[in-house]
Image (cartoon, helix red, strand yellow):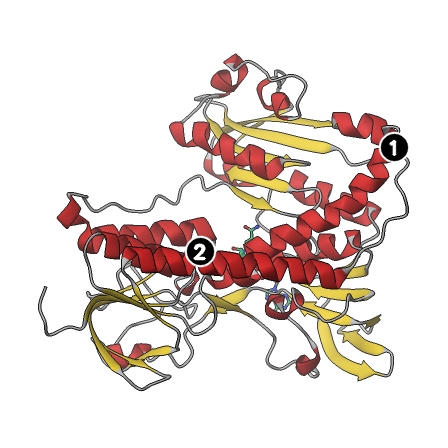
């Protein structure tokens, strides 16, 4: 390639999308440089999915100790050490960060640990030493950052998911704002680890866009676990007192607490990036506008992952980054360009109980299809028969009543995340309810209910 450029691809951001694009592009023979200002691995590895899952697993031991009694165990008195968990988490993500660095190095990517900003259509400045790099192609993969209401009095007292993993002391009380993935996952973690948890949500019912049965089932389980919900309300102000914090809400409630966690969504991380210097345009919501190949309005500039606000999930960013690398450099290896398919993306919410979901919710299906059949079951998982737990597993299959095609599957309960990954395969393949029925059950499991729900619960016609 031409020597007018220092590199064939400059990747800004070493998160899920960026590192995948860089590694694949370098593997295709491109000269690649990747800049990361914080830690390699990005939100998911450093302060998102991975540490979150570790904390979820830590929190669930609380239930296991209790459940064990029903199976004949007499566990000794259990105590929990937050600092040990934080330390163990830190060691693990440091190990993962090292693996990412090795992966980049092994592929021949030059990783620079600095903030990088765009200075012109092909020019990128490395902030730590001022070097200007001329890049044939640029990939913006800078991810997102947590939102905090900029007008909230006392906003300096709140934390976000950036800080929550590394709190110096375990909060005895925590108030969590938001009704989405992050708010509900941390509500579960902190409650099971022993904190008093209050969730404050601006609407009437959390988890907007999720299937109604999942929403209701989770809230019921959370209320049983002692989580308090304050609905149709938001913060008016946060004040520090001698005893911690007081969050005052618009309706006048005073919530005394040790920490306030804001989990009210994330925004594309583009501030000061110099997008204007390359003439890159934004979508109305402030994300970088891209086409189906992740190309911006500037043909040699691409963007993937949360900075584009398509489907803000790690596996999606990884696919998008991979597709860009193949598009730009795959020809050398005989790889044809391809596009990410956004249909039927399975996803899990790592609450306890967990939610796994793929495809259309019942409400979405009823809007789009003339005849919708629902198969629904709710049962006590076998463990609960001896442990005495009250939580029920809920499963729902949404079917096109005219073609028998399965449109969506929703699971609330233990193992939902693991199950839904596998259910995603038949859904992509266009499986019918008859295919589910014809599959032999694995007995005794919870998952077998997915292939043994013979009786329709409801039929909705338009
Ligand atoms: P979500 O979009 O899931 O939820 C944001 C929540 O905050 C919603 O309940 C929203 O309310 C509420 N909200 C938005 N703006 C305000 C406001 N101004 N005042 C009060 N409340 C507000 O975002 P999260 O921050 O939880 O997570 C960000 C993204 O990260 C997720 O969308 C997801 O893609 C990803 N993620 C995925 C996980 C997983 O796969 N397990 C785990 C964690 C994050 P309303 O519903 O009314 O809009």
Mark yes or no: residue 163 visible: yes
Q: Judge from the rendering whether residue 163 lies leftward or rightward of residue 384; answer left or right.
A: left
Instruction: Give the camera-side residue of 160 and 276.
Output: 160
The residue under the point 45% across, 27% down is 426
Image height of 21 relative to 114, above or below: above
SS label for mark 1: loop
Q: How far across and down, in percent of the image, does residue 431 sit?
A: 44, 24
Q: How far across and down, in percent of the image, does residue 420 sit?
A: 54, 35
The residue under the point 14% across, 49% down is 332
Pointer 1 residue: 73
Q: How far across and down, in percent of the image, does residue 203 sit?
A: 67, 59
Check the picture and name the quadrant holding the N terminus.
Answer: bottom left
Image height of 426 relative to 414, above or below: above
Q: How far across and down, in percent of the image, does residue 52 sit?
A: 62, 55
Could you tell me how far apart the alpha carbons at marks 2 and 1 are, in whole angstroms?
40 Å
For ligand 1, give the image quadrant: bottom right
Image height of 194 relative to 430, above or below: below
Q: Residue furthest bottom?
A: 130
Pointer 2 residue: 99
The residue under the point 35% across, 43% down is 341
- Is the C-beta of the residue carrying label 2 under 8 Å from the nearest atom of ligand 1? no
Image height of 391 relative to 270, above or below: above
Q: Judge from the rendering whether residue 149 lies leftward or rightward of residue 249; answer left or right.
A: left
Q: Which mark is residue 272?
A: none
Q: Judge from the rendering whether residue 65 lies leftward or rightward of residue 328; answer left or right.
A: right
Q: Judge from the rendering whether residue 123 lies leftward or rightward of residue 112; answer left or right.
A: left
């Amino acid at each position: 390639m031409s020597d007018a450029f220092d590199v064939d691809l400059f990747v800004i951001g070493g998160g899920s999308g960026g590192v995948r694009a860089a590694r694949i592009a370098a593997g295709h023979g491109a000269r690649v440089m990747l800049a990361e200002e914080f830690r390699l691995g990005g939100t998911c590895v450093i302060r998102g999915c991975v540490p979150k899952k570790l904390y979820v697993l830590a929190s669930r031991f609380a239930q296991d100790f209790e459940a064990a009694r029903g199976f004949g165990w007499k566990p000794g008195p259990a105590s929990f050490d937050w600092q040990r968990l934080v330390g163990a988490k830190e060691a693990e993500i440091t190990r993962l960060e090292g693996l990412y660095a090795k992966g980049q190095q092994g592929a021949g990517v030059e990783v620079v640990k600095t903030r990088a900003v765009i200075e012109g259509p092909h020019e990128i400045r490395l902030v730590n030493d001022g070097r200007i790099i001329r890049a044939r192609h640029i990939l913006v993969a800078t991810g997102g950052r947590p939102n905090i209401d900029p007008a909230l009095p006392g906003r300096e007292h709140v934390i976000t998911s950036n800080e929550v993993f590394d709190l110096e002391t375990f909060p005895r009380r925590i108030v969590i704002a938001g009704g989405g993935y992050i708010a509900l996952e941390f509500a579960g973690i902190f409650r099971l680890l022993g904190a008093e948890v209050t969730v404050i949500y601006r609407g009437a019912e959390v988890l907007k866009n999720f299937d109604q049965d999942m929403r209701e089932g989770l809230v019921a389980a959370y209320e049983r676990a002692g989580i308090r919900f304050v609905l149709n309300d938001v913060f008016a102000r946060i004040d520090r007192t001698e005893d911690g914090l007081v969050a005052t809400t618009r309706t006048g409630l005073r919530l005394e607490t040790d920490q306030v966690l804001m989990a009210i969504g994330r925004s594309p991380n583009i501030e000061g990036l110099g997008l204007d210097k390359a003439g890159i345009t934004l979508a109305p919501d402030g994300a970088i506008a891209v086409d189906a190949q992740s190309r911006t309005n500037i043909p040699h500039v691409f963007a993937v992952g949360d900075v584009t606000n398509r489907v803000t999930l790690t596996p999606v960013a990884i696919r998008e980054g991979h597709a860009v690398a193949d598009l730009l450099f795959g020809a050398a290896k005989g790889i044809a360009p391809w596009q990410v398919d956004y249909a039927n993306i399975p996803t899990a919410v790592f609450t306890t109980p967990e939610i796994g979901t793929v495809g259309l919710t019942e409400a979405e299906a009823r809007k789009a299809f003339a005849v919708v059949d629902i198969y629904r079951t709710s049962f006590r998982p076998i463990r609960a028969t001896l442990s005495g737990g009250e939580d029920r597993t809920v499963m729902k299959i949404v079917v096109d009543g005219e073609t028998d095609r399965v449109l969506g599957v929703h699971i609330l309960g233990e193992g939902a995340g693991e199950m839904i990954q596998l259910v995603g395969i038949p859904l992509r393949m266009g499986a019918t309810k008859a295919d589910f029925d014809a599959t032999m059950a694995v007995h005794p499991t919870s998952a077998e209910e997915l292939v043994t729900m013979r009786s329709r619960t409801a039929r909705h016609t338009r």
